[in-house]
Amino acid sequence: MGMLVTQAADYPYLTFEATDGNKISVSTESLTLTISGTTLTAGNQSFTLVNLSKMYFSTTDESTTGISETMVADLDEATDIYDLKGNKVSRSQMQKGVYIVKTPKGTFKVTVK
């Protein structure tokens, strides 16, 4: 058993990137890292070592949520819009809520506030 003490300087997050591209950031404040067999535990997050591609300090939470900013221009190019019940809706029917929007650039989850 060994112990290593490090400082993250001005970096409030340690970000772990998996081989599939997903990212999870954990706060560096009072962070404890533990390796047991093939599992790395960082705070309350656990990772299988073989599935990690890298880890690095970051200034922002880079956790992958599956939701990103979508511009109004992307909505103008929408070919299909669905509510979460699977009903097809028009842009004018969109009210507050979450929608699945298909565009030539890809399919997005959109939150209307």
Image (cartoon, helix red, strand yellow):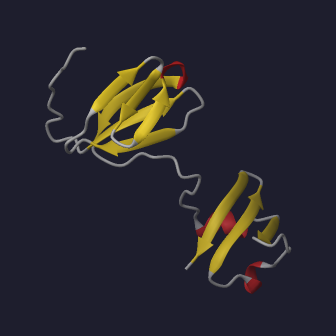
- Residue placed furthest toward the front: 1
Quarter of the figure with the C terminus: bottom right
Residue 26: x %, y % from top left: 34, 43
Query: 78 or 88, which is in the foreground?
Result: 88
Residue under the point 77% across and 53% down: 104
- Tell me: residue 34, above or below residue 1: below
Which is nearer the eye, 89 or 34? 34
Query: Residue 60's x, y, as percent?
Result: 32, 48
Residue at coordinates 19% horizontally, 42% vertically from top-left?
30
Q: Nearer the viewer, residue 19 or 45?
A: 45
Give the side of residue 106 with respect to residue 3, left or right: right
In percent of the image, x 38 and y 43: which residue is there?
44
As drawn, the residue found furthest toward the top would be 1
Which picture quadrant has residue 98?
bottom right
Q: Is residue 74 left or right of residue 9?
A: right
Residue 9 versus residue 37 in the image, above or below: below
Residue 110 position, x and y percent, is 63, 66
